[in-house]
Image: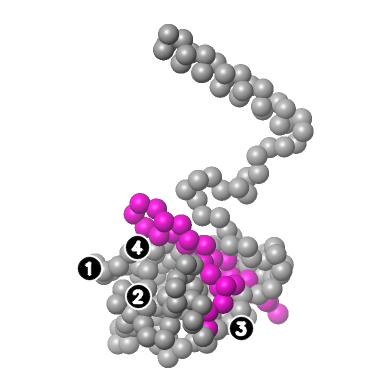
């Protein structure tokens, strides 16, 4: 009996599969490929909703120029929860910006910045599709601020955008004097890391 149930279930699935595909094809109703399957982070609503560029924020006192070029800020023995941040640099007309410079810096797990070396500091360039990918840790918090990541973004031969990225569901967000919902990353936890997505929108000259 159990065997029969399994067979009939499998047959139902097969029939469903056969019936679905031509129907969808005729109606032009293929599944929306923009709907990310479970396990992938949805893109932040960006240039498609308003065309507004990513807002600027203050640089703050802890920026240091001449950081190393590297996509991973992870170093041996660095404590903290791993964070993978990725996204695209786009123009206000949604064109990917290739070769854009992204410079990241943020506090360590305890809320301290490295002011002597370049721990948790680095820069990288977008690829041909305007994509970037940063491997780092979740920054700690420090007095008077909510959790954040500093970043400078510059398309080739364009002005620098200096801004900060924020984490959703942080109790301090609502009390932070700089926090903007527009600068929230889209987050997803996985078993081994936190995954974040943010697309930068630049107004090009
Ligand atoms: Fe800061």
Please tell me the numbered disc located at residue 58: none
**Residue ID for mark 4:** 82
Please tell me the numbered disc located at residue 159: 3
The kind of secondary structure element at disc 1 is loop
- In the displayed structure, does residue 67 sit left or right of residue 202? left
The kind of secondary structure element at disc 2 is loop
* Scheme of colours in the image: one colour
Please tell me the numbered disc located at residue 77: 1
Residue at 35% of width from left, 63% of height from top?
Answer: 82
The quarter in which the N terminus is drawn is: top left
Local packing at callout 1 (Cα closer than 10 Å; few below 14, some 14-19, many 20+) is few
Mark 3 and mark 4 lie on one chain; the one further toward the N terminus is 4
x, y (%) of residue 104? 44, 76
Residue located farthest toward the left when viewing the structure as drawn: 77
- In the displayed structure, does residue 123 sit left or right of residue 73? right
> Considering depth in this image, is 162 or 129 the residue closer to the camera?
162
Are discs 3 and 1 less than 8 Å apart at CB? Answer: no
Mark 2 vs mark 4, foreground winner is 2
Mark 3 vs mark 2, foreground winner is 2
Give the spatial CA distance, label 3 vs label 2. Answer: 30 Å
Q: Residue 17 magenta-drawn?
A: no
Give the spatial CA distance, label 1 vs label 4. Answer: 12 Å
Q: Which residues are magenta?
A: 178-205
Mark 3 and mark 1 lie on one chain; the one further toward the N terminus is 1
x, y (%) of residue 47? 67, 66
Give the spatial CA distance, label 1 vs label 2. Answer: 16 Å
Q: Is residue 28 above or below residue 92?
A: above
- In the displayed structure, does residue 62 sit left or right of residue 51? left
Mark 1 vs mark 4, foreground winner is 4
**Residue ID for mark 2:** 140
């Amino acid at each position: 009996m159990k065997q029969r149930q399994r067979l009939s279930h499998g047959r139902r699935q097969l029939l469903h599969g056969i019936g679905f595909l031509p129907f969808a094809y005729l109606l032009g109703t293929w599944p929306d490929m923009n709907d990310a399957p479970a396990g992938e982070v949805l893109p932040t609503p960006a240039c498609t909703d308003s065309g507004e560029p990513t807002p600027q924020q203050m640089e703050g006192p802890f920026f240091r120029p001449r950081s190393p070029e590297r996509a991973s800020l992870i170093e041996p023995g660095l404590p903290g929860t791993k964070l993978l941040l990725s996204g695209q640099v786009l123009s206000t007309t949604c064109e990917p910006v290739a070769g854009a410079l992204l410079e990241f810096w943020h506090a360590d797990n305890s809320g301290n910045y490295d002011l002597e070396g370049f721990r948790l500091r680095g820069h990288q360039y977008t690829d041909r599709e305007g994509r970037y990918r940063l491997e780092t840790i979740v920054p700690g918090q420090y007095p008077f601020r909510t959790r954040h990541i500093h970043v400078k973004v510059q398309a080739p031969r364009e002005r620098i955008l200096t801004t900060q990225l924020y984490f959703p569901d942080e109790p301090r967000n609502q009390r932070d004097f700089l926090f903007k919902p527009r600068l929230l990353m889209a987050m997803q936890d996985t078993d081994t890391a936190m995954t974040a997505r943010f697309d930068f929108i630049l107004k090009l000259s």
